[in-house]
Amino acid sequence: MATIDTASILAQFEISGNVGEVKPLGNGLINDTYHVITDGENDYVLQRINNAIFQDVDLLQHNIEVVTAHIRRKLEACGTDDIDRKVLQFVRARDSKTYYRDEADRYWRVMVYIPDTVTHEAVTPEHARDCGRAFGNFEKMLVDVPEQLGETIPDFHNMELRMRQLREAVANNAAGRLDEVRDIVDELERDADEMCQAERLYREDRLPKRICHCDTKVNNMLFDKQGQVLCVIDLDTVMPSFIFSDYGDFLRTGANFTAEDDPDLSRVGFNEEIFKAFTTGYLESARDFLTPIEIELLPYAAALFPFMQCVRFLADYINGDTYYKIKYPTHNLDRTRNQLALYRDVRRHDQMMSAFIHSLLN
């Protein structure tokens, strides 16, 4: 904070009231976020956009503006009360944009702070069902967005691309680590064709892309003090994708019994209770707009994301740890083995998942 002149940055935005205190907010890994306390009607959230990751900030903010405006119109049409607590509201800068670029080429935005809210880090069955319902409803409200949105991170969840990156890493063997992981590479290659089916189905016009959140973690949702979901937050990755991105990525983290880098593989496993709760909530909201093939492939989505993350961790390990931050030399290898163990356990639940989804629909 000492090197950032928050007063001059905030002066670029049309906020009301006098600024009192500015203090760090949350524990996000991508953007720097601050709570701006004022003597006016609203407090605010000041956030530095990480333009190393989100390189087209104009596209990023346009996506968010379109999505939040569309959700607000939907809530108004339904006569929803307390709408300002149920959709994010961005403050315009003096030039009418929803972001400001400072002299150091840092990008900033301001949102109205939603008070009396909580976020959760732990995934319980109750929270999983709430999240499933909320993320499904989020997608449902956006099925008729009136314009095409762009990809804020191109090919973010493109499995074919991730396999190409792994094969390039294997071919180059930059860190000389291939021999020790050859068995993992071979196992992933055996299932690669099946795991890349979403892209093929899309090219055949059998699978649609929709506006998805693409970062469906429990802490990307605000709850009120009574435990009710208010709104989905952290909209930077909202973009066209397969619904598998929202469904599968939540289960990858939320339904693993342990953290993704736990080296003790005996603790890794697929939590059926979380799967059932999240799926129940998700289909409560999403079944009305999902196509039969999207529903049929939900078990595939649950397997796809640990597979994809395993591929990404392994490619980085072979490359010499050039992408993910590591805490020790075999950190990426432990992550790889963890996600591979989770993938294997998810596949052991294929029949259970299909039967449970069928039971919900009937």
Image (cartoon, rainbow, N blue to C red):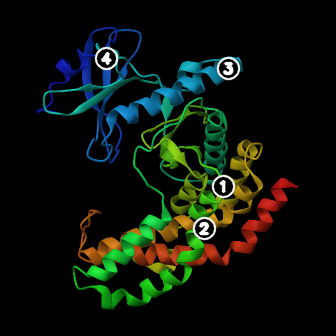
321 sits to left or right of 74: left
Image quadrant assignment for residue 109 = top left
**Counting residues from the N terminus, which is met first, the one under dot 1 or under dot 3?**
3
Find the distance from the CA under tag 3 to the CA under tag 4: 28 Å
Q: Tag 2 or tag 4, which sits nearer the N-term?
A: 4
* Labels 4 and 1: the sequence-earlier one: 4
Q: Position of residue 320 (x, y in %)?
A: 23, 74
Q: Which mark is residue 137?
A: none
Q: Which tag is nearer the camera, tag 3 or tag 4? A: 4
N-term-proximal mark, 3 vs 2: 3
Return the x and y of residue 66 as percentages of the image width and height: 50, 28
Where residue 177 sits in the image (x, y, percent)? Answer: 27, 85
The residue that appears at 41% across and 71% down in the rendered structure is 164
Could you tell me which secondary element the residue under label 3 belongs to? loop
- Judging by the rendered image, the residue that carries numbered circle 4 is 93
Which residue is tagged 1? 205
The amino acid at mark 2 is: Gln
Quadrant into which the C terminus falls: bottom right
Q: Name the residue at 29% across, 78% down.
A: 318
User: Dot 2 lies on which element?
Assistant: helix
Q: Secondary structure at mark 1?
A: loop
Q: Which residue is identified by label 2?
A: 197
Task: Give the residue type at disc 3.
Answer: Thr
In 3D space, how far apart are the residues under numbered discs 1 and 3 (Cα atoms)?
36 Å
Q: Amino acid at mark 4?
A: Ala
- Horizontally, residue 166 falls left or right of residue 287, namely left
Q: What's the residue type where badge 1 is placed?
A: Asp
Badge 3 local density, few (<14 within 10 Å), some, or many (20+)?
Answer: few
In depth, the one of 212 and 83 nearer the eye is 212
